[in-house]
Image (tube, coloured by chain):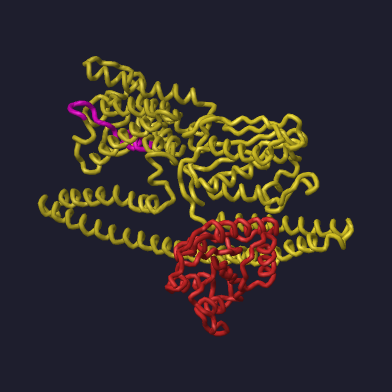
Amino acid sequence: MVCGALTATIAGITLVGWSVDAEVPRSGLPGSVAMNPVTAVSFLLIALPLVTLRRSGLRRVAVAAASVGGALGAVKLIGLLGGLDVGFDRWLFPGSLENVAGGHPNRMAPNTAACFAGIGLSLALLRSDRDHHFAQVLALLVGLSAFVALAGYVYDLRELYGVGRFIPMAPNTAIAFLLVSAGAMLARPDREPLNVITSDGAGGTLARRLLPAAVFVPLALGWLRSFGERVGLYATETGIGLMVVASVVTLTILVVWTARLVDRGEDERARLQREIEEKARQLNIMNEELESFTYAVSHDLRAPLRSIAGFSQVIEEDFADRLDDSGRGYLTRISDAAARMGVLIDGLLDLSRINRVSLKRERVDLSGLSARILDDLQQANPERSVEVEIEPGLSAVGDPRLLEVALRNLLGNAWKYSRNETSARIEIGSPNGGSNLAEETFYVRDSGAGFDMAYADKLFGAFQRLHGVDEFEGTGIGLATVQRIVHRHGGRVWANGRVGEGATFYFTLGNNGGDS
Amino acid sequence: MRKEPILLVEDNPDDVELTRRAFHKNKIGNEIVVARDGVEALDYLFGRGQWIDRDTRFQPQLILLDLRMPRLNGLEVLERIREDERTRRVPVVVLTSSDEEQDLVRSYDIGANSFIRKPVELDKFIDAVRNLGLYWLVLNEVPRESE
């Protein structure tokens, strides 16, 4: 936007210069060719898209303005190439055009025309997602041409800013093109090619510091050399030699300075890295301690549990005649409680084991696995008739043992919670159908008791249950186990349900069954 | 055929009691010798300490070995058993509450014949012992002792 504004200002000053017949405003450098008034108008047109870049509403206007500016340049260029005298550059201030310094009557220069054609196209395409890269390359080319012209003025080399016998590009025109080109390049700072410079990383910082030097140091040294030679300080060869030496020295200093900068950045990075590693190490140790604690506790709890369950049974068997019904009933409760505790401990052990084993990565046939699990369930409960639908061809990459545990939990739940339905139905499938997608989703659906979505966030907590033990037995570890398995694969698990209408559990397994 | 005793190496007295009961329920008649830890077990097998007068030409028909015990743990006992010529071929069933994969693997590596995890429920335990007895004491063949 700033570039656009500045360009417009230059154009405006030029036009003012023409109207009051003042030389400096209309050519930038005294003694140089002046910017043609129509060129100035074209610049105004070109500046419009830049100034309005951020306002999406004016896009069509901007594109139209850029196209007109570009067209003007293209027409003039074609005319010059074809030998035609396309005269619209004489429409403004026709009288003053003929009496100017520099020898030529003032016209739009061919290189100026070419640049307008290029930059017009570039600005017209700038907002398009598809073509903006091309647009910026064009802008870069135009900027380079303008830079060459400007360098020509700095070194007083006419070949750089004028083509053949045609009128050369004016210095303020060159500056204006540079501004427009810069504006076009800055239009998309977060994408190629500018993001190399604007990025936050080491590369961006380096680029931002070195780029000005890369541009100005050679320019300055070159100018110094030619200035010294012109003033008579030294001959051409000496001048070149001096410039070479100066270049070497400057570049070496730059390299050393840059190296120091990079080193400092790397030191900082290494320090942060070490900090992270230290924290990770501590976290790992804590985790391991927690796991071995969980393991030891679960393990050591099983022995007394065996005693409780075992001797209750012994009493039941050996002293049955000396016990009445309530006595035997109490003993049964003790045994049942012990059995439940055993399942809980086993569940805890399983849960802790999931984090300890190393993850294998294989392609697992989930359809086949589900079929086997449902088969087992049917065999264990032959009296139940459940409608089963398994989508064929379901497969995923992951650890086969853990995936089996997860599916056993999910399908086992589906089986358990649809127990009270007369026509129970269990489905397993994939909503986006087919394998080989980046993150494939699977679901297990049952037509059973369902759950209240209000408590959905408690579903996967360890020991959290949404039903009482008398409704459905269970320890509340199953879904926690599923979640841990899914998380280890880099995936997510969630569920939808309705009381009395069943539940659907969805899970993904991340990309390539990764390990987190 | 001479019925040799079963050596039960177990430190938990409750488990000893329940194991005896399980064998009794299954009408397995072998005498059950109990060693409370690894040291006692090796004393028995090699005729040392309190068992100094035992005739070590006769070895148990079956050794039931727990893994987690004080002093010498089960795996070390198993190593010694498999190292000695007198006891190398005695069937050893590891009967333990551990479900650690590495215990399983190490046991088989050192030469256990079988690995059984003690269930919590007594019924299941009795079943396990019955199957144990049926297999290791009746069905399974061992080399004849060279007298």
Chain coloured red in the rendered structure: B
User: At x 65% / y 72%, what residue is drawn?
Assistant: B12
Residue A220's x, y, as percent? 26, 50
Q: Nearer the viewer, residue B51 or A113?
A: B51
Residue sitting farthest toward the top:
A84
A192 in the magenta segment: no
- Is residue B91 shown above or below A494? below
Q: Is residue A183 visible?
A: yes
Chain A visual colour: yellow
Q: Nearer the viewer, residue B9 or B28?
A: B28
- Is residue B66 shown above or below A26? below
Residue A453's x, y, as percent? 74, 40
A167 in the magenta segment: yes
In the picture, residue B147 is in which quadrant? bottom left
User: At x 26% / y 36%, what residue is drawn?
Assistant: A149
Residue B64's x, y, as percent? 57, 67
- Which residues are the magenta region? A163-179
In the picture, measured across the screen, residue A243 lies left or right of residue A384, that is left
